[in-house]
Image (spheres, rainbow, N blue to C red):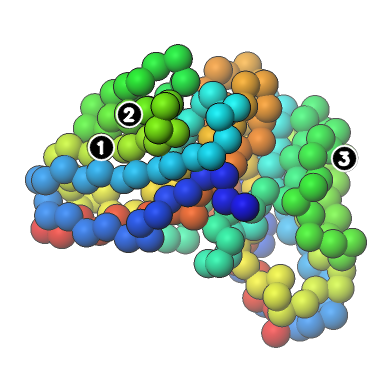
Amino acid sequence: DQQVKQNSPSLSVQEGRISILNCDYTNSMFDYFLWYKKYPAEGPTFLISISSIKDKNEDGRFTVFLNKSAKHLSLHIVPSQPGDSAVYFCAANRRNNRKLIWGLGTSLAVNP
Amino acid sequence: DAGVIQSPRHEVTEMGQEVTLRCKPISGHNSLFWYRQTMMRGLELLIYFNNNVPIDDSGMPEDRFSAKMPNASFSTLKIQPSEPRDSAVYFCASSSDGTLKNEQFFGPGTRLTVL
């Protein structure tokens, strides 16, 4: 039972354009959401997060949007760069619970 | 500033052998997590410790898997006996209760191949 779903296994975009990665969740008790980026042969690294009390969080080229009623969040990368090519994981948890529930990831390819 | 350290980076062993994976968390972090990554199931949490105490081991596949954290700076994940289906990348991560972001810092992983 996948509580966090990333329905697109892969995404390809042109350099300079916007990349939009999507994530859906089923557990309404989740109140904190994180995005991680993973390069081959490395561990995931934290990218950006959002609390359920917000609907948007921005950090440079990266913006995460949260739609609680739809149980959906998205990561926008603008403008996309070739160095952004990686696997992106969405994760969620409940307040005061250190256990993260992970999606299966979306592989992003940014073409020059 | 050293991150999470895992050893070995690669391990190739034969079915039935004992495998021990090692992790040194970031100094000052008090939560430690062991994950397994496979193509089919993505990142699965196996077990996590808080202040050296196992909190949730519901992800440990079976009795062949065991994990210990004898002190704040060291943890091991042991598989005995190993089987080919245990082949995966095993990640260790650590975090600090003092942060609000719930951010976990990952090591580079150990790629395990069981023949």
Q: What residue type is labelled 1?
A: His
Host chain of mark 1? A
Q: Which amino acid does label 2 sit on?
A: Phe
Q: Is mark 2 on a helix, strand or loop?
A: strand
Q: Position of residue B66 (x, y in %)?
A: 86, 55
Q: Residue at x 58, y 35 (%)?
A: A27
Mark 3 residue crowding within 10 angstroms, few (<14) / some (14–19) / many (20+): few
Q: Name which quarter of the figure residue A64 lies in.
A: top left
Q: Residue at x 71, y 71 (%)?
A: B86
Host chain of mark 3? B
Q: Pick whichever, A101 or B71, lies toward us.
A: A101
Reading the image, the residue beneath label 1 is A76
Q: Position of residue A11 (x, y in %)?
A: 27, 57
Mark 1 residue crowding within 10 angstroms, few (<14) / some (14–19) / many (20+): some
Reading the image, the residue beneath label 3 is B70
Would you say B108 lies left or right of B79 here? left
For residue A45, say whether it is visible: no
Give above or below for A109 relative to A89. below
Mark in front: 1 vs 3? 1
Q: Which residue is drawn at 60% across and 27% down?
A: A29
Mark 2 residue crowding within 10 angstroms, few (<14) / some (14–19) / many (20+): some
Residue farthest to the front? Answer: A69
Q: How far apart are marks 2 and 3 (CA)?
A: 41 Å
Would you say A94 lies left or right of B48 here? left
Q: Distance between the residues labelled 1 and 3?
A: 42 Å
Q: Which amino acid does label 3 sit on?
A: Pro
Q: Could you tell me if the residues under marks 2 and 1 are in contact, i.e. CB atoms within 8 Å?
A: yes
Q: Position of residue B71 (x, y in %)?
A: 84, 35
Host chain of mark 2? A
Give above or below for B67 relative to A57. below
Q: Which mark is residue A65?
A: 2
Q: What element carries label 1?
A: strand
